[in-house]
Image: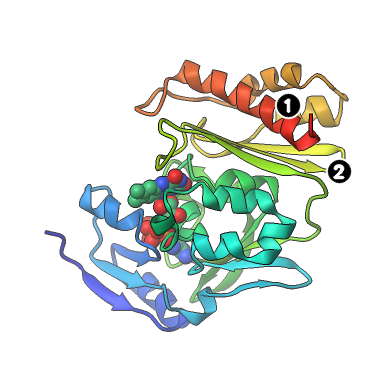
Amino acid sequence: MLSYDYIKCNDLRTACQELEEGEQVYLLAGGTDLIVGMRGGKFSAKTLVDIKDVPELKVLEEDDQGITVGAAVTLNEAVVFAPIRDNVPILAEGCHSVGSYSIRNRATMAGNICNASPAADTAAPLYCLDALINIKSSEGSRSMPIKDFFTGPGKTALNKGELVQSILIPRPYPEGRGVYLKASRTGSVDLATVGVAVQRWGEKFKIAIGAVAATPVRAFSVEKAINEKGEKNYADAARLVHDDIAPITDLRGSREYRYHMVEVLVRRGLEQTMGV
Ligand SMILES: Cc1cc2nc3c(=O)[nH]c(=O)nc-3n(C[C@H](O)[C@H](O)[C@H](O)COP(=O)(O)OP(=O)(O)OC[C@H]3O[C@@H](n4cnc5c(N)ncnc54)[C@H](O)[C@@H]3O)c2cc1C
């Protein structure tokens, strides 16, 4: 049986203090990664700090800067938030791809990126949108681009005592369609074998991919071929994605299968965003 102390936080200052002072302290948001990980021996927590009801983390709003998604906002709340649905639907698709309805009723976007799985479904859309991660500690606040946040499987750029307060989707929003395409072993609840986000920005594209390297990655070779060299053949462009990824074989798929599926999904993503 698991044994740990449980602290319910009602304000951000206390959450930061608990995180800073204790050893083996874990934040509990939706718990859909954390509790599973504790049961499986991946995390050994002495203390859980529950941040679900911290008012500062429940912010979900749009202002001049963009869309702010607080760390205690559930994925289901994000999916139906009109500014996300209307302005950055690729992110709504990424959120909606996570688990099942009941998982998304608890799971958060912050938990998804802090767990730092290379297969995290919100990560590739957030890369395409140049999201900023707002980080808080007792010492103060800082922000960093999502591209610097993931540092390895299960690893982030957070220092001890730091938590993610919110995620900002900055303006200007992309002009043009975006899609998130996920290949998984089953048609229902499963982590991505490969997850591909393709976002048009006018005549240019941003492409990000999950589950094919130690962290989510941008497909810079494909982007360069289309955005800078004017490649119009999407099948040829998609083939270049092999230079951007370093997939492994695991229980969800072989290295070779991932190379194949990424190429297919990048091509499909380009075609769909162009309405071909
Ligand atoms: C059945 C099932 C299916 C799933 N399917 C998918 C799927 O299809 N795609 C997918 O991407 N994921 C999937 N997941 C994983 C999980 O649901 C998501 O990663 C989810 O978004 C995690 O959010 P959470 O709020 O539950 O995080 P938690 O479990 O509460 O936290 C995850 C980790 O992040 C830390 N953390 C949480 N919030 C913060 C914060 N604000 N600052 C710093 N650290 C923080 C925690 O301490 C913990 O280490 C699935 C999980 C289950 C159980």
Whether 235 is drawn above or below 114: the answer is above
Horizontal and vertical percent for residue 146? 61, 51
Dot 2 beta carbon under 8 Å from ligand 1: no
Whether 191 is drawn above or below 226: the answer is below
- Could one spot residue 181 in this view of the protein? yes
Q: Quadrant of ligand 1?
A: bottom left
Horizontal and vertical percent for residue 15? 41, 76
Whether 205 is drawn above or below 87: the answer is above
Name the amino acid, label 2: Gly
Q: Residues within 10 Å of mark 2 (few under 14, many from 20)?
A: few
The residues tagged by marks 2 and 1 sit, at their Cα atoms, a distance apart of 16 Å
Look at the image and tell me in which quarter the C terminus lies.
Answer: top right
Badge 2 element: loop
Q: Circle 1 is placed at which residue position?
A: 222
Q: Does residue 32 appear left or right of residue 75 in this picture?
A: left
For discs 2 and 1, the disc positioned in front in the rendered view: 2
Horizontal and vertical percent for residue 270? 73, 31
Mark 1 or mark 2, which is nearer the start of the sequence?
A: 2
Q: Does residue 156 appear left or right of residue 22 in this picture?
A: right
